[in-house]
Image: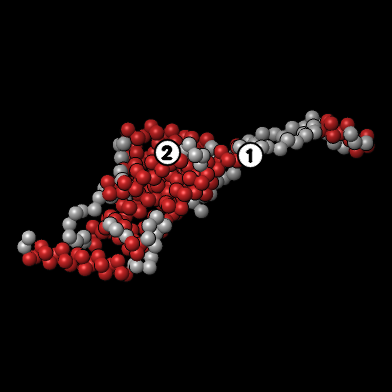
Amino acid sequence: MNLFYRFSILTSIVFLLGLMAWIKESHAASFNCAKKRSILEIIICADPNLSALDSEVSEKYFTLKSLSSGTQNPKILTEQRKFLQDRLKVCPIPFKPTLSDEESGQIIVCLKGYYTLRIATLKKEIANQEGQVRENIPKTTSTVVSTNQAVGNMPEAESKAIPTNQSIPPKSETTLPQCDQSIIAKKYYVASCITHGMEIGKKSDMLQDAESKMNSERKQIDCSPDSLDRVHAAANSAAERIISSGMISSLMDFGDAITIECNKAATTSLK
């Protein structure tokens, strides 16, 4: 081992020790930054936003475990372990004495995207579990009295003023709300953006699932058709802007990257 190489290693060690001292008091929820053991943990602790994402993943994971039944916990644990193990596969760290600012920045951006996707998955699973809990709560029964029954129990003078056999008319399309600028439409916006991004990127293997998701989200939104068409058009424009501007990181899977960027666009566009 030559003198220059030894000096490079020594410089790296000194840098890492200094970085460890600088963030000695900071903590991420899944581990103690003062007792970090790997370069990955050092990178997480060095970036406040990434550290916050690490904390949120841990928080959501334990929330999901608390809501789930015992039979589901092994599956949840396996998925969390896979997420942790795959971090360096998705966002590899070069094995070298020092990393440039550009290399460190790319790794941090990649990890932020990877953590954001995990948080979205955990939130969805938590919502599903909360829905199952509500379904299991016994429902109270109530007696429904028809208009005719109510009128029959009233004095004749009062009953003549109340028309019988009335029904509430179904909501027509003209009375549906305009929600193209509402957060209600966010899921449909994101799904439309992802679908168009798949079309532009010629990702035919993922396009069918994306279209199915988009159509499903549209059916669930109680908004006027012209309002939803505007959401769809805005999402398509966002997808075109994302692809043409080169915002898709080469460090990430295309599907993951377009999902992150479309969520960002929806947050900006929908109030």
- Work out whether 46 lies above or below 215: below
Quadrant of the image occupied by residue 213: top left
- Nearer the viewer's eye, disc 2 or disc 1? 2
The 10 Å Cα crowd at callout 1, few under 14, some 14 to 19, many 20 or more, is few
- Helix, strand or loop for disc 1: loop
The 10 Å Cα crowd at callout 2, few under 14, some 14 to 19, many 20 or more, is few
For disc 2, the marked residue is 75
The answer to whether one can see residue 129 in this image is yes
Per the rendering, the mark at residue 147 is: none
- Work out whether 269 lies above or below 215: below
In the image, residue 32 lies at what x, y percent? 37, 60
In the image, residue 231 lies at what x, y percent? 48, 44
Q: CA distance from mark 2 to mark 1?
A: 25 Å
Q: Is residue 16 left or right of residue 167?
A: left
> 153 or 247: nearer the eye?
153
- Helix, strand or loop for disc 2: helix
- At a point 42% along the width and 38% down the height, the residue shown is 75
In the image, residue 138 lies at what x, y percent? 66, 37
For disc 1, the marked residue is 137
Quadrant of the image occupied by residue 202: top left
Locate the N terminus and report the quarter of the image it occupies.
bottom left
- At a point 17% along the width and 60% down the height, the residue shown is 97
- At a point 30% along the width and 60% down the height, the residue shown is 42
In the image, residue 251 lies at what x, y percent? 27, 48
- Work out whether 50 lies above or below 76: below
Amino acid type indicated by mark 1:
Ile
**Residue farthest left in this picture:** 2
